[in-house]
Image (tube, rainbow, N blue to C red):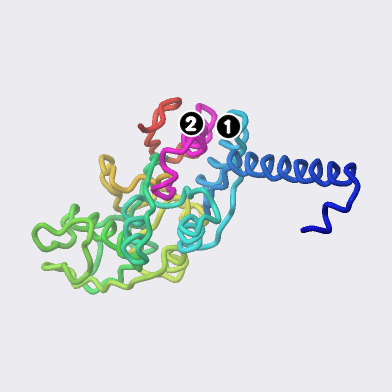
Amino acid sequence: MKKQFLFPLFLTLTLILAACGNDTKEASSETEEDTHIIIASQSEPLTTMVETAAEVIEEPYTMELLPVNDNIQYNQATFNDEVDGSLAQHELYMEGFNEEVGADLVAIQPAYISNVGFYSPVYDSIEEIEDGAEVAIPSDPPNEARALLILDSAGVITLAEDTGIDAAVADIVENPKNLQFTPVDLFNLTAAYEDGVELVFEHPNLIANIGLYPKDAILLEDEDEKRFAFQLVTREGKADSEKMQAAKRALTSQEVYDVLMETAEHDMFTPAFEPGQPAE
């Protein structure tokens, strides 16, 4: 340190100004980071919703879509602060992730309800299902429960009394058609349909890849089911931040609503928000 005082005064001033310049750059970088929002998502129309929101988000905020390929990456990225949030799942699936890894994710804005149901390459109605038919259902617990609750509501099976969103195949107490349940990864259910599995649970955005829509399902979920709305998810500590509030406003804009309704023409989705009215 003593040697520094031997330098000329102008050099000392130069170093001070350089340091100030670095501080300014760091502050600018921090500000940019605080206003740039990264949202992970993986399938339509969710990805298009994020991209549309990015076009209309209010200044000084900017938004970026991070495409992911499976049902694990978006939650891990959010929990590890690699992204600010995700638009990829319903709240029950998120809660399962929280319980599994001790995460603190929270759902802060519903987007839409996916009109899920059962499809069959063999039968034209649920009444035609034969004894011993194979049924492909999601392998993850929340979506497994969702599929079983649909069958229970239709009287195809009977679940144990008081069974709810944690329903599993083990909770079936009556199975008059001796249905054979096969757990399948959510993104492989359409392939199960193509392979000829008699009855397959599927989401509309995925079954649409082979030209099928809810009108083609032989059994649909009740329209009043609200528990499975896809949600904007973030970490608990970020939920009330200005940037996530800006994200909510952008994702509930008229432009995003219009994009969603364009897809809804096949009755694939039911919006879970009114344009311009983000959840409180």
The numbered dot on residue 249 is 2
x and y, in percent, of residue 271 in the image: 40, 36
Q: Give the prevailing secondary structure in the magenta stretch.
A: helix
Q: Residue 31 versus residue 119: which sits nearer the camera?
A: 31
179 relative position to 271: left or right: left
Give the structural element (helix, strand or loop) at label 1.
Answer: loop
Q: Which residues are magenta?
A: 233-262
List x then y, in percent, for residue 270. 38, 38
Say what amino acid the circle numbered 2 marks.
Answer: Arg
Left or right, 98 with respect to 37, comes to left
- Amino acid carrying label 1: it is Ile
Q: Tell me what residue is drawn at x 76 percent, y 46 percent.
A: 19
Quadrant holding the C terminus = top left
Neighbor class of circle 1 (other Cα within 10 Å; few <14, some 14-19, many 20+) is some
Residue that badge 1 annotates: 57
Q: Residues within 10 Å of mark 2 (few under 14, many from 20)?
A: many
Q: Give the Cα separation between the discs numbered 1 and 2.
A: 8 Å
| Residue shown at the point (52%, 52%) measured from the top left | 41
Residue displayed at 82% across by 47% down: 15
- The reply to whether the magenta stretch includes residue 55 is no
Quarter of the image with the N terminus in it: bottom right
For the residue labelled by badge 2, is the local secondary structure a helix, a strand or a loop? helix
The answer to whether the residue labelled 1 contacts the one labelled 2, judged by CB atoms less than 8 Å apart, is yes
Tell me the quarter of the picture where residue 170 sits: bottom left
Q: Eyeballing the image, is 139 above or below 25?
A: below
Q: Is residue 239 magenta?
A: yes
